[in-house]
Image (spheres, helix red, strand yellow):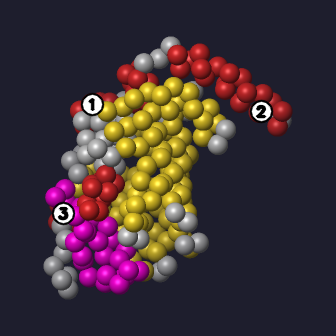
């Protein structure tokens, strides 16, 4: 069984260069969007609520992500038994993080806002890339820990760069390399995606793992709601004491 699996991986690896040479960046992006459910379905998404379990600092806790177009985002999560909130209303970003001594809502420093806004773009930057102002370059064949992949460099509208790796058979994402601001500094981050499921026609990863600095964070999605009603006040920074 192991030999059969290894042989299949080898044959796929040999086939990828020929497959890659025959494709353009637009073809790869079109196949990726189709694999994710199609552009029309994604353009019809106004909001998402995603909830499940987050593992960080070797402990598990619940999380809820609320996302609303164009760039409103909020995540409520439990870390080390304490509730942490990170949010942006599209203009200002704020957080509540008792682990850093911030028990009250606190505005995010200007140099960190771009990272918060990037997290607020919940859908992949590869979906409707041109409309978002993202530039994508197809780099050809690559691999992720030995797994064959299609490699794409993305330059977002804000100038930030990241690299995406797609499965050459399914065109779904395998991994992403980018940078994340954490604990007062920028860190290189790898994110790995798996357990894809279809929800209201959208194909979404239900498990992903992040590695940055010495940190490891695993997210398991248990429920996804497409186009729920979300009060815009959820994204606004509360007044002190609220």
Residue named by callout 3: 92
Which numbered disc covers residue 6? 2
Horizontal and vertical percent for residue 192?
54, 48
Does 23 sit left or right of 71 as displayed? right
Q: Which residue is drawn at 64% across and 36% down?
A: 147
Q: Dot 2 lies on which element? A: helix
- Residue 12 lies in the magenta-colored region: no
From this view, report whether residue 197 is shown above or below residue 93: above
Q: Residue at x 51, y 51 (%)?
A: 190
User: Exactly how many numbered labels are in the figure?
Assistant: 3
Q: Give the range drawn in magenta.
A: 84-110
The mark that comes first in sequence, 1 or 3, is 3
Residue 99 is inside the magenta segment: yes
Q: Is residue 153 left or right of residue 191?
A: left
Residue 209, given in percent of the width and then of the height, sits at 54, 55
* Measured Cα–Cα span from mark 3 to mark 2: 50 Å
Q: Where is residue 135 in the image (x, y as percent from the top left)?
A: 31, 33
Residue 173: percent from left, percent from top? 49, 38
Quarter of the image for residue 38 reads: top left
Q: State whether residue 206 is above or below residue 1.
A: below
The residue positioned 77% from the left and 33% from the top of the image is 6
Query: Callout 3: helix, strand or loop?
Result: loop
Q: Which mark is residue 103?
A: none
Camera-side residue of 65 and 79: 79
Q: Nearer the viewer, residue 191 or 49?
A: 191
* Disc nearer the start of the sequence (2/1): 2
Image quarter hosting the C terminus: bottom left
Does 1 appear above or below 175?
Answer: above
Distance from Cα at disc 1 to Cα at disc 3:
25 Å
Tell me which label, 3 or 2, sits earlier in the chain. 2
Quick check: can you spot residue 62?
yes
Q: Name the residue under label 1.
A: 130
């Amino acid at each position: 069984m192991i030999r059969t699996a290894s042989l299949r991986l080898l044959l796929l690896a040999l086939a990828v260069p020929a497959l890659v040479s025959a494709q353009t960046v637009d073809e790869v992006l079109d196949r990726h969007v189709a694999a994710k459910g199609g552009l029309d379905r994604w353009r019809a998404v106004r909001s998402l609520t995603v909830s499940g379990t987050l593992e960080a600092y070797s402990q598990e806790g619940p999380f809820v992500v609320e996302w609303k177009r164009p760039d409103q985002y909020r995540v409520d999560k439990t870390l080390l038994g304490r509730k942490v909130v990170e949010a942006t209303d599209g203009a200002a970003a704020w957080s509540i993080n008792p682990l850093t001594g911030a028990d009250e809502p606190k505005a995010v420093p200007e140099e960190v806002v771009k990272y918060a806004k990037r997290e607020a773009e919940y859908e992949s930057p590869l979906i409707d890339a041109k409309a978002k102002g993202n530039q994508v370059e197809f780099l050809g064949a690559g691999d992720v820990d030995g797994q064959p992949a299609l490699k794409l460099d993305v330059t977002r509208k804000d100038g930030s760069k990241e690299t995406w790796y797609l499965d050459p058979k399914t065109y779904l994402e395998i991994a992403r390399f980018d940078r994340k601001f954490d604990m007062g500094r920028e860190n290189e981050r790898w994110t790995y995606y798996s357990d894809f499921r279809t929800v209201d026609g959208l194909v979404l990863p239900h498990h992903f793992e992040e590695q940055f600095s010495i940190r490891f964070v695993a997210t398991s999605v248990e429920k996804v709601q497409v186009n729920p009603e979300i009060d815009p006040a959820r994204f606004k920074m509360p007044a002190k004491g609220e």
